[in-house]
């Protein structure tokens, strides 16, 4: 890794760190070290980084703002690329916007609401980056990313880049083609919005932010929703009815505010969280015959 690190630093691709704890880069504050951690300062430098990764045939994965992510205590093998500063550009052309994958989703929703553009009100309060939101088709309040995306610029596992249309993204509930069929990460996205009443749009964004604050435990480190809703049921409601709110394993606890959130209540490990996830799955299956599936992405060394 020393040789790889030297090449990346010589190319001045951005921030390059060895054995960087991923707990510093996830919203639940859990995760062991990455062998090598790179935060490219531009899309051009991301391309340079990928060339080095391919040259040395290294394992790699990308992260955004670290929400919806549970990283193993043993860390991640290979290179972790963080899409952040440098890949967070924003261009607004009438009712079409082009935005970098590293841009904060909440900030984007707030920014465009002030310009009287409608379509992202649902994103008020959703943590994470634009790239992560497109990757998992993030949504709330009856809408989601698939309703507004025109196309997305994707970096695939083999290091190639390609624009995919909305149809090619194959969106469904909290999923896209990028998760299994064509693994990749979102570098940029183009959204088509609608012009509307600025005051009404801003008010709706604020209402959705307030709802999140009142109903979800962001006063503790957490990863967002842990389980997909097993529609027509709701994960949080099933967990609450099963009496699991407040249940704790080690430093991981099911939030008393919302059943579909596991919080880091103090020095939680990924093993604590995984054990709690399994406990919830077992109880809900036994009580209701419902098989729970995780929405949070679980990555890293076993």
Image: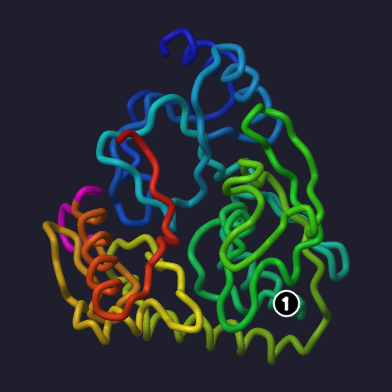
Name which quarter of the figure residue 119 lies in.
bottom right
Residue 215 falls left or right of residue 82: left
Q: Is residue 6 left or right of residue 54?
A: left
Looking at the picture, tell me which residue is in the foreground, 241 or 221.
241
Residue in front for this viewpoint, 59 or 107: 59
Residue nearest the observer in this picture, 165 or 182 = 182
Residue positioned 59% across, 68% down in the render: 173
Residue 41 point in image, percent of width and height: 60, 34
Furthest toward the left, the residue is 250
Q: Which of the 4 image quadrants contains residue 54?
A: top right
Residue on which the image places disc 1: 119
Magenta highlight range: 264-271
Note whether 278 is above or below 53 in the view shown.
below
Q: Residue furthest right?
A: 94
Label 1 crowd (10 A; few <14 / some 14-19 / many >=20): many
Q: Is residue 248 left or right of residue 173?
A: left
Residue 181 lies, with reference to residue 195, above or below; the image says above
x, y percent for residue 164 = 79, 48
């Amino acid at each position: 890794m020393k040789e790889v690190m030297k090449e990346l630093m010589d190319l001045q691709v951005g921030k390059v760190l060895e054995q960087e704890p991923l707990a510093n880069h996830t919203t639940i504050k859990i995760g062991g070290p990455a062998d090598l951690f790179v935060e490219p300062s531009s899309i051009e430098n991301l391309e340079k980084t990928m060339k080095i990764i391919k040259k040395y045939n290294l394992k790699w994965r990308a992260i955004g703002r670290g929400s919806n992510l549970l990283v193993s205590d043993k860390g991640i093998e290979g290179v972790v690329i963080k899409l952040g500063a440098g890949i967070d550009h924003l261009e607004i052309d009438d009712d079409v916007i082009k935005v970098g994958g590293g841009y904060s989703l909440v900030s984007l929703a707030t920014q465009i609401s002030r310009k009287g553009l409608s379509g992202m009100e649902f994103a008020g309060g959703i943590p994470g980056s634009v790239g992560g939101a497109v990757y998992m088709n993030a949504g709330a309040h009856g809408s989601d990313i698939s309703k507004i995306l025109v196309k997305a610029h994707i970096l695939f596992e083999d290091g190639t880049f390609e624009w995919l249309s909305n149809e090619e993204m194959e969106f469904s509930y909290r999923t896209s083609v990028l998760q299994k069929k064509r693994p990749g990460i979102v570098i940029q996205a183009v959204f088509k919005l609608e012009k509307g009443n600025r005051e009404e749009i801003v008010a709706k964004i604020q209402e959705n932010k307030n709802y999140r604050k009142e109903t979800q435990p962001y006063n503790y480190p957490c990863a967002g929703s842990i389980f997909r809703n097993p529609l027509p049921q709701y994960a949080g409601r099933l967990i609450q009815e099963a009496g699991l709110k407040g249940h704790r394993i080690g430093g991981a606890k099911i939030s008393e505010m919302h059943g579909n959130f596991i919080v880091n209540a103090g020095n939680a490990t990924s093993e604590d969280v995984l054990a709690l996830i399994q406990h919830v799955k077992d109880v809900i299956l036994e009580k209701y015959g419902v098989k729970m599936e995780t929405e949070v992405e679980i990555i890293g060394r076993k």
